[in-house]
Image (spheres, coloured by chain):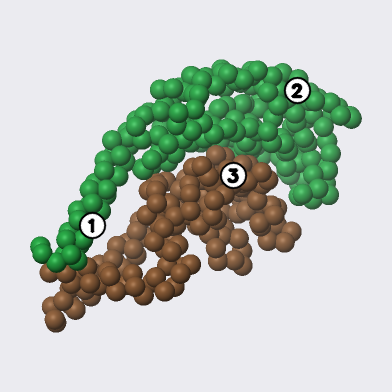
Amino acid sequence: LFYQVLNFAMIVSSALMIWKGLMVVTGSESPIVVVLSGSMEPAFHRGDLLFLTNYDHEPIRAGEIVVFKVEGRDIPIVHRVMKVHEKDDGSVKFLTKGDNNNVDDRGLYANGQAWLNRKDVVGRARGYVPFIGIVTIIMNDYPKFKVSFDFTRKFYLVGKQ
Amino acid sequence: MHTFLSRVNAVSAFSLSTLAALTFLCFASTFFINYTAPVTINAANIVLKNVPEYAVSREKNDLGALRFDLSSDLTPLFNWNTKQLFLYLTAEYETPNNKVNQEVHVTTHSVCVPSFNSEKWLSLSWGFQVVLWDKIIRRGDASLVSLKNQHLKYYFWDDGNGLLGHKNVSLSLSWNIIPIAGTLPTWSGTGTYKLTFPAEYTQGRTY
């Protein structure tokens, strides 16, 4: 039993190391995100997984898919950049819109905010895997599942011995 | 391997690993593909107005309007790992911004919407990019794009009055490849169109 516990702890800590390592390599505070809404259909559906990078030296261009957070809110939003404007002082501002939305995101930004800045961006979508993130959504929507999911996961690990 | 649970365990572990391997193959097999294609763009009926853009501020900004033709064959871009293409027509341009106390023009250059070539990245500079039109082509849809005299889908607002008499607005078509699994590259069509805006504003409703 002791070894099983140790094994489990090893798995958990290596998962954590990989996560933190990804954060450093990609430069993003959240290098893997789950798509939460249907505003980018048919490209991304709820539950898809996106891999992000957030390199400062790569400029944000129109047409890219960015994940951003509106100031003061915690929910990351995955939309596409519609307009990019750079001012003489080097600051960039841009406007986004979801593919499946009819209007741009000005309604989603903070009150009075008409553009997004570089600091609002969590990262640029660089890779995509469909469907895997459904697990996170299920666990958020139905907290009971989280308990049973944890149980089955532990059982699975134990069973693998 | 006798209990039901251990069988379920084995089957699910195997199917998950196979799925993961297939997904990785999808990603790896299309990582290096060049998704370029030739594009012809044409524009006409170019009109410029100067009206307040109320969603942003009370100031008057330049609003451009035009009709465009577009033709391109995008069939070679669809492979086993392409779920959809997101096409978008971008207008990019530089505007000289005269700072009040300076005599030198500070020009912000435009980002040429480049493909993911590292050599082109080195010659990048900054500027204005506006998406004027977009379209989603899903796998199985018609992949031959042939539009004539098309309206813009989105308003061509400038942030200020930079479009007046501008002779070097470049229109280009780019696409974002959405794979079944893998990277999300952006590529541009070879072939751009240079727009020139009139040196005076048009009043009233013209399209």
A87, above or below B79, in the image: below
Q: Chain of mark 1?
A: B
Residue B77 horizontal side relative to residue B56, left or right: left
Q: Nearer the viewer, residue A55 or B65?
A: B65
User: x and y percent of residue B105 in the render?
Assistant: 69, 37
Q: Which residue is mark 1?
A: B12
* Residue extending furthest toward the right: B204
User: x and y percent of residue A110 in the render?
Assistant: 68, 61
Amino acid at circle 1: Ser
Residue B83 is at least partly visible in this image: yes
Q: Which residue is mark 3?
A: A100
At a point 23% along the width and 57% down the height, the residue shown is B12
Find numbered disc 2 in the image and state the secondary structure of the residue it sits on.
Answer: strand
Residues packed near mark 2 inside 10 Å, few (<14), some (14 to 19) or many (20 plus): some
Give the quadrant of residue B70. top right
Mark toward the viewer: 2 or 1: 1
Residues packed near mark 1 inside 10 Å, few (<14), some (14 to 19) or many (20 plus): few
At a point 25% along the width and 72% down the height, the residue shown is A154
